Amino acid sequence: MNLKSAPDEESQESLSETLRAIVHPVLSERLLSRAALTHLDAISARLPARLTSHFGYACRLGGAEARADLHLAVRRWPGGELVAEGRGMGLFEGLAWERLRAFCGLWSQSEEALADRVLHVWWEFDGEVSGAADPVPAVYLRPREDLLVPGADLGWWTEASRVLTGRVLSAPVIARVGRCLAALPPGAWVYQLAARGEPRPSSVRLRLRGFVPHQVPAYLEAVGWTGERAALQEALGRVSPLLDTLALELDVGEEVRPGVGLDCYVRPGPDHSSRLWRFLEALEGWGLCSAEQRAGLMAFPGVIHQGAAPEAWPGHLRGDAPFVPPGAVSAFVRRLHHVSLALRPGRLEASAALRVRHQWCSRTQLDALLFWERTEARRGPRPPRLART
């Protein structure tokens, strides 16, 4: 489908309309308050619906105020092209948006090196209300897995970070990133990375997946992490019996800074529901999650298809679109992706990543998703994996 041939009414649809129809009816106010929802809705109302079909919220747990950040995945087409050309972007202005458009301009062109190296970008809008007229997302790049391995040439990444931040990463920062890559244990890999510019000195935020909990302390020791080891050991001791894998989030400058994020995953399986419940129950026992938030997280997973909300369904994802395979059904699947524990100097914080992703399903696949929802979704497991149609 030619992006520029999309009907005018589709081009005017906002991401806010999608979120209101697909997510907000099942999102507990204990996870996202009305005030926080209003703030994030004002941002999503300025973004076109066609920008993404994979989005969600990072809901902060444990506090009295239910706040969250808005997350969305942007692919090279049509998202990167939309941003580069500024179509339907709500007239976002400012230097940071100019840099983001410049990056997407390079990324969306097939002849540019970035087009082959960056699979998608992940935008994160802060849920905190600020005085900025045009909020700017943190931008994480999802590279090909073979690009960030020990000894890899990081030239493409340093150029991407320069375009996004206007600053060149220093040689010591690049060397420290290389040390982080060289120390990765078997099975671990770089999932996302982001350049950090002002107000602090340039640094790189790394998201690393595939860690078994017992690998974490030795890895952090190897890369020169400067955080509190006793607090780390205590956090790992609590979560290790309840989890399968961890992902790490590190802020890498000339040294690896003290804060570290532990993304906690419970793999699907016969006992997934009970294990996920036990994990959330443990969070509540540690004072990191309330009983109401735990209930809201367990109630979030599910599936909705076009037939359930025909009038509110995003125009570009309706089953009568010209590029849709015959018989395909348009559906969104909701799930609790992971829980993040942020270890900061003197404190531990938790947040839950709620994800919603569009899928084109055959009728048989939709029946499988609906069966999953009826029997398991309210207790927490992931939906079945579906073949691409």
Image (cartoon, rainbow, N blue to C red):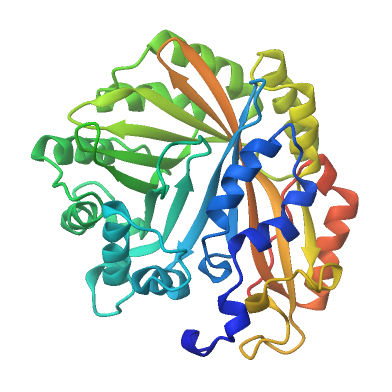
* Left or right: residue 242 compared with residue 73: right
Q: Quadrant of residue 114?
A: bottom left
Query: Does the image show residue 389?
Result: no
The residue closer to the viewer here, 113 or 40, is 40
Q: Quadrant of residue 217?
A: top left
Q: Quadrant of the C terminus?
A: bottom right
* Left or right: residue 289 compared with residue 157: right
Q: Residue furthest left?
A: 171
The residue closer to the viewer here, 320 or 283, is 320
- Image spot of residue 260 (x, y percent): 41, 26
Is 146 situated above or below 367? above
Is 9 situated above or below 332? below
Is 75 situated above or below 152? below
- Image spot of residue 181 (x, y percent): 27, 41
Query: Does the image show residue 378?
Result: yes
- Image spot of residue 99 (x, y percent): 26, 58
The residue closer to the viewer here, 54 or 224, is 54
Is 192 situated above or below 110? above
Q: Residue furthest right?
A: 374
Q: Residue at x 77, y 86 (%)?
A: 327
Q: Residue at x 25, y 33 (%)?
A: 199
Q: Residue at x 70, y 49 (%)?
A: 335
Q: Residue at x 33, y 66 (%)?
A: 104
The residue closer to the viewer here, 175 or 43, is 43
- Image spot of residue 75 (x, y percent): 45, 67
How many numbered callouts? 0
* Left or right: residue 351 compared with residue 344: right
